[in-house]
Amino acid sequence: MADRRLWSYKEIAAHIRVQPDTVRSYRKHGLLPPPDHVESGKPYWYADTVRAWVAARPGNRGRSTG
C-alpha cells in the first residue's frame, strides 16, 4: 500500500537526520524532487516520494534510513 502522507521540510529532515534548513538548501539547488503538493505556498512531498529519493541518493547504498 502506498504511503500518501505528506511530509514537510521538518519531516524529511527528521527522516534523513539533518536540519530542515539543509533540506531547503537541497531543494534550492535542485537536489530534492519537485513537491507533490503545494498548500499556501508551502511544499509537501509524499512519504513514498521521499523514501524513493533517499534510496537513489549517491553514497546511500546499503544504508538503512529506518
Image (spheres, grey):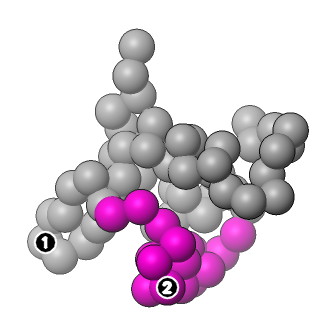
Secondary structure under the numbered disc 1 in the rendered image: loop
| Residue found 45% across the figure and 78% down from its top | 30
For mark 1, what is the residue? 40
Q: Is residue 24 visible?
A: no
- The span shown in magenta is 18-34
Residue sitting farthest toward the top:
1
> Is residue 59 left or right of 39 when viewed as pictured?
right
Closer to viewer: mark 2 or mark 1: 2
Secondary structure under the numbered disc 2 in the rendered image: loop
* 25 over 5 or under it: above or below: below
* 9 over 49 or under it: above or below: below
| Residue found 66% across the figure and 44% down from its top | 55
Could you tell me residue 4's position as x and y percent? 33, 33
Could you tell me residue 19's position as x and y percent? 65, 75
Residue sitting farthest toward the left:
40
Could you tell me residue 37's position as x and y percent? 21, 55
Label 1 CA crowd tier, 10 Å (few <14, some 14–19, many 20+): few
Look at label 1 and name its amino acid: Ser
Seen from the viewer's position, the closer of residues 61 and 47 is: 61
Look at label 2 and name its amino acid: His
How many marks do you count on the picture? 2
* 37 over 49 or under it: above or below: below
Q: The N terminus appears in which quarter of the rendering? A: top left
| Residue found 38% across the figure and 22% down from its top | 2
> Is residue 13 left or right of 66 when viewed as pictured?
left
Q: Which mark is residue 29?
A: 2
Seen from the viewer's position, the closer of residues 55 and 10 is: 55
Could you tell me residue 60's position as x and y percent? 79, 51
Q: Is residue 42 visible?
A: yes
Question: Is 40 contained in the magenta span?
Answer: no
Question: Rounded to the nearest whole Å, what is the CA distance between mark 2 and mark 1?
Answer: 22 Å
Q: Which mark is residue 18?
A: none
